Amino acid sequence: MKNAKILLMMAAAPAVMNAQFGAPAPATNTTAATQLPLSGRSGQSGSAAATQSPIPGATTSVNTLNTNIQVTGPYSGSASSTTKAPFSAKLTLKEAIERGLSYNLGAVGLTAAVRQSQGQARSSRSALLPNLNGTFRENLQTENLQALGFRLPLLPALIGPFAYFDLRATLNQTVLDITALNNYRASKEIVAANEEAVKDARDTIVLAVGGSYLQCIAAKARVDSERAQIETADAVYKQTADRRRAGLAAQIEVNQALVKAQTEKQRLATLQNDLSRQKINLARLTGLPPNDNYEIADNVGFSAPPVLSVDDAVKQALDSRPDLKSAVAQLRAAERSRSAARAERLPSLAFSGDIGEIGPRFNQGLSTYTISGTLKIPIWQGGRAEGDIEQSQAALDQRKAELEDAKGRIESDVRNAYLDLQAAASQIDLARNNQDVARETLRLTREKFDAGISDSVEVTQADETLASANLDYITALFAHNLAKLSLARALGGAENRVTDYLKVQPAPAAPTGPGAPSHEF
């Protein structure tokens, strides 16, 4: 029995010494399924959305809509753009959108996410490709033979010290690993999903920047309108004062005209403050310095909405929206991840080999090599495969729910944009008519006042009616253009639709004199 034990240990000794002398251990498959996060949606919670709500209560204004553009999260910020793209201090709508697409933080962050996922895909692919490494070892060691079981006469218990070197190249190659293969396929789907998410972010940026630019145009139009009201109020005050000196008007009329002129000047200061704030907000979206020291160079007038039925628009959106394509890619990634988890129960095959020189000195080295193949058959892994399958199935179920939600959200985006467009179109028609009536009323009232058969109170009231009509038209036109921009975003590919949906033209000079803005800003 003792001799048998010695022979068994001597047979095992070459394997032990082979490992000590640098030969690779047989390759084993320890690949586990890549576990995706539960939700496939981007970690960025920012958004841009046009909102339209009714103004409650009774009002003398025909404006019944409260329209706004809300930008949150990373889309409300940007990286500096002026160092790489010089700025002329005149910002057109096209340039604003281009700067937003290049420097807005929403696009910057998702572009970085694409690069990160591409790197992860390359890392996953490395498990399927050959791995070649080189090593050089210089050893000095002693060995206790009795500890290894060699207790033979005339054989010393301790041998050494002896030195040797080992210069070796090692190659490992996976031949068959279904889990690693599906992990790589899942990572490629994640790359595709992130690339579509970048396209969706660009649509969001077009809405955010375009909507903010429209807000600046509307704010600028209100300032121009108010300047015209100030000119009218000053003219009425001067004329009333002249009539008072001629004994044709009471002092109370002069006081009322003066209060009106001063109030309009205060209102102008407030509107100018709002314009400056809107320009600063737009600068933050486009990477410009956060100030209002630039000019809004474009005007967006009225143009008819695209001729496209709601049902056709919904179908077009479902075919082209990048966020839906991203959700589909996320679903495919989750399916690949589940397949990878299930494949953890399957055998895997790999081989490894090495070749090199080993010996006591460089001039005494001998070439050696090792080639080994490993077939791993999972029998029991403590329930790891079952746990991975359960996690991947949960992620897959979540992806399916998110895909269905994406379809519903896209349809609601399109239908809401059409509803907003219809409401704004109805209001813009009414605002135009009221503008014409108010302008005619002011003209007739001024004629009566000049003829001395009316007082300044009627002129002031007519002027306030026209001012209200002008503001109603400005608000309605902003709502109409923003609704068209929202529809472009809802359909997908917004940056290619802006010029078709919005009537862009150079900004006109500020209007002067009674009457203020016409049908265009």
Image (cartoon, rainbow, N blue to C red):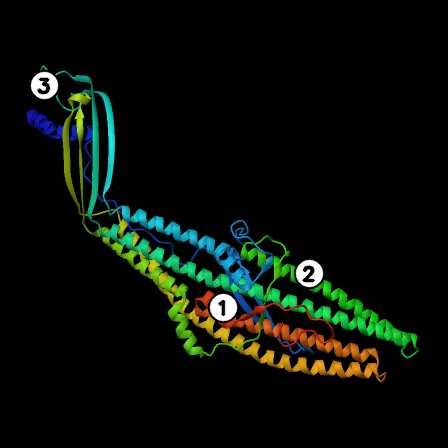
Is tag 3's residue or tag 2's residue first in the polypeptide sequence? 3
Kindly state the secondary structure of the residue where label 2 is placed.
Answer: helix
**Circle 3 or circle 2, nearest the eye:** 2
Kindly state the secondary structure of the residue where label 3 is placed.
Answer: loop
Pointer 2: what residue? 273
Mark 1 crowd level (few <14, some 14–19, many ≥20, 10 Å Cα):
many
User: Residue flagged by tag 3: what amino acid is it?
Assistant: Leu
Q: Using the numbered discs, state the Cα–Cα distance from disc 1 to disc 3 in whole angstroms.
A: 92 Å
Q: Nearer the viewer, residue 462 or 449?
A: 449
Pointer 1: what residue? 498
**Circle 2 or circle 1, nearest the eye:** 1
Specify the quadrant of the image occupied by residue 396: bottom left
Mark 3 crowd level (few <14, some 14–19, many ≥20, 10 Å Cα):
few
Pointer 3: what residue? 152
Q: Are marks 3 and 2 in contact (CB under 8 Å)?
A: no
Q: Quadrant of the N terminus?
A: top left
Residue at image point 74% right, 73% down: 513
**Whole-percent x, y for residue 519 in the image:** 63, 77
User: Residue flagged by tag 2: what amino acid is it?
Assistant: Asn
